[in-house]
Amino acid sequence: MIENDKIESEFPEMFELVLATAKKSSNHGIYVTLDEYDELPGFLHISEIATGWVKNVDRFVRVGDKKILKVIRIDKERSETDLSLRQVTGEERKLKLIEVKKSEKAKTILQMFKDKNNVSDEELEKITNILEEEFESVYTGLAAIAKNGIEILKDKSIKNELQKKLDKISKEKIIIPEVQVKGVIELSTNDSDGIKVIKDIVKDSSKIKTPDARFNIKYLGAPRYGIKVYAEDYKTAEKSLKLIVQKIEGKFKSKGKFAFNKEWWFQMYKIIRKCVKCDTYSMDNECSVCNEKTIFPHPPKYSPDDKYVRLRLKERYYSDDSSDESSNGSSKSTTS
């Protein structure tokens, strides 16, 4: 059996967020068990369910529900914990749910890895322990392998054959999120060998080291060159783009004219995301309405690439006017 990402201990810590399952309802509150702590019993008092007066606990928590709760008291002698629902903020709940989903995904991946490759329980436990020791969690370890390869593991005691298979399944099942920013640089010079100078500088710029990001430079037509930077988040991508531009500018400044223009529309275009379930648009990786994952729509509604944008705008902004006009016309004809 695969252990949870969280290092199992007898009791959670004070003010820790835990995933709990409601087992029994009473007039005073809800009896629960803690999923991550071997079904450790806990109690959610009616005063900690919501702010204000709670007449019926079933309105907020029903038997069988799974809730994110906060530990507010621990009784080791009775092996019980007192919990709170009202003290959990929306942001805390969101982060904890993401953590739980990652933990479940990691367990699923390792179970598939075990079944596919006939891995023994002892070997799987060894791999799990290595990932937990070297990284914050099993999922974080698998994500690091997916991004950087199996070579990132310091412990080399895993069999070579299993290392390769673990590397493969990590890259297949975990998709590292990637964003991109881009801009255009303009290089012009009056030197007789200006073309060679520009080509050499562009060629050398490919050797610039950008931690946690990759980039490419493409010729767009004299004197313009496009730069695209790819990274896990916009902050890293922006930082790398700034570094590349500064390096190129420093090398070329004394040889001719340098200009840089950032394509802001493209950046905003890549920030817009759409929920796969309820079609809500946002800038988050998870939908705030239904907690499903979001994707980059192709293209977003009302964007310059939306081939139906004119029809959408017409329907949205002119339909009301036309209906008003028609109603006014009918009223006039009736009056006349």
Image (cartoon, rainbow, N blue to C red):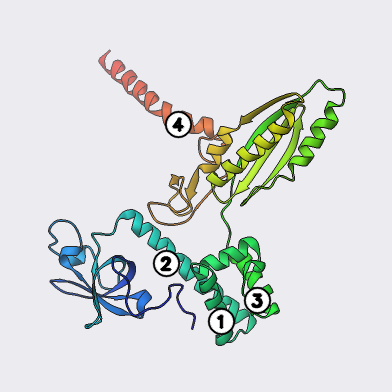
Name the spot of residue 31 as percent of width and height, x first.
22, 75
Mark 1 element type: helix
Residue type pointed to by label 3: Lys
Q: Which-is-in-front pick, marks 3 and 2? A: 3
Name the spot of residue 129 as percent of width and height, x first.
52, 78
Counting residues from the start of the chain, the first of labels 2 and 1 encountered is: 2
Contact check, label 3 and label 2, Cβ < 8 Å = no
| Mark identifier at residue 315 | 4
Residue type pointed to by label 2: Val
Residue type pointed to by label 1: Lys
Residue at x-position 76% and y-position 29%: 221
Front residue (pair 46, 323): 46
Counting residues from the start of the chain, the first of labels 3 and 4 encountered is: 3
Counting residues from the start of the chain, the first of labels 1 and 4 encountered is: 1
Q: CA distance from mark 3 to mark 2?
A: 28 Å
Q: Which residue is mark 1?
A: 126
Mark 4 element type: helix
Q: CA distance from mark 1 to mark 4?
A: 61 Å
Counting residues from the start of the chain, the first of labels 1 and 3 encountered is: 1
| Mark identifier at residue 58 | none
Residue at x-position 54% and y-position 70%: 134
Q: CA distance from mark 2 to mark 1?
A: 22 Å
Q: Which residue is mark 3?
A: 156
Classify 10 Å Cα crowding around label 1: few (below 14), some (14-19), many (20 and above).
Answer: some
Residue type pointed to by label 4: Glu
Mark 2 element type: helix
